[in-house]
Image (tube, rainbow, N blue to C red):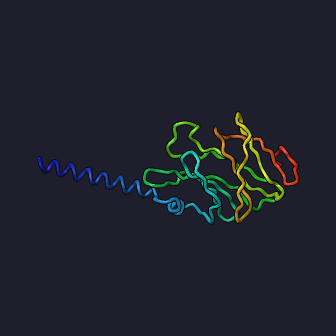
Amino acid sequence: MNFKVILLITSIILLVSIVSVVYYKSNYKTLDEAIRETNIPIDEIFHNIDFKDHTIIFYGKEDVLSVGLIEKTHLGYRWSVGAGSKHFNEENLILTRMFSNLHPREIKLDEDLVSLSFGVIYEDALEKIRIKYKDQDLTEATIIETSKGRIWYSFSNTPVNYDPEVTRFYKDGKVKSEWY
């Protein structure tokens, strides 16, 4: 009887150890460690923000802007997904846009997606951007100055699979409701 108890306890300890090692391999104690260990090529992190219990990062490699989702877990942070390919050096554009529905690892509903539009602003005179998603109020996009140029982003309450409406506001008072 004692042998069976010892074998059972040893088996449980071994199982817990294996699960812990596997879990710790994909969960990191700090946000910086989670980013560093992803093997995603990143030169610079331009901005991060907490949204829907996740950390959203805007990052770059050479002249490409991308966005990533890092999940907060009980033991730290875990890289979930990244998307993007907006370039900082495109010519003859006012601003670029891309939409993404970032998919956390454990998702039950479309509302659990982290949906957003983002891009690069090329026109220096552009002061504000407002975005209108279907069945949502007009919202002001966040504009961030980075070492490579200005970027913008706007979250959506529902998944995005289309170009939202845009209104551009200029420093001289002009207002335009078009992407180009």
The answer to whether residue 23 is seen in the rendering is yes
Residue 69 percent across, percent down from the top left = 57, 51
- Residue at horizontal 60 percent and vertical 47 percent from the top: 102
Q: Position of residue 144 (x, y in %)?
A: 70, 57
Q: Is residue 163 left or right of residue 45?
A: right
Q: Nearer the viewer, residue 125 or 61?
A: 125
Horizontal side of 162 relative to 113 (left or right) equals: right
| Residue drawn where x is 63% and y is 52% of the image | 83
Image position, residue 10 (x, y; %): 22, 53
Task: Give above or below for 42 relative to 127.
Answer: below
Could you tell whether 58 is left or right of 137 in the image? left
Q: What residue is shown at x 64% (from left), y 39% (from top)? A: 157
Q: Which x, y percent locates residue 170?
A: 84, 52
Number of marks in the rendered image: 0
Q: Is residue 99 above or below residue 40?
A: above
Residue closest to the eye, 114 or 98: 114
Whether residue 38 appears in this view of the structure is no
123 left or right of 78 in image:
right
- In the rendered image, the residue lying farthest to the left is 1
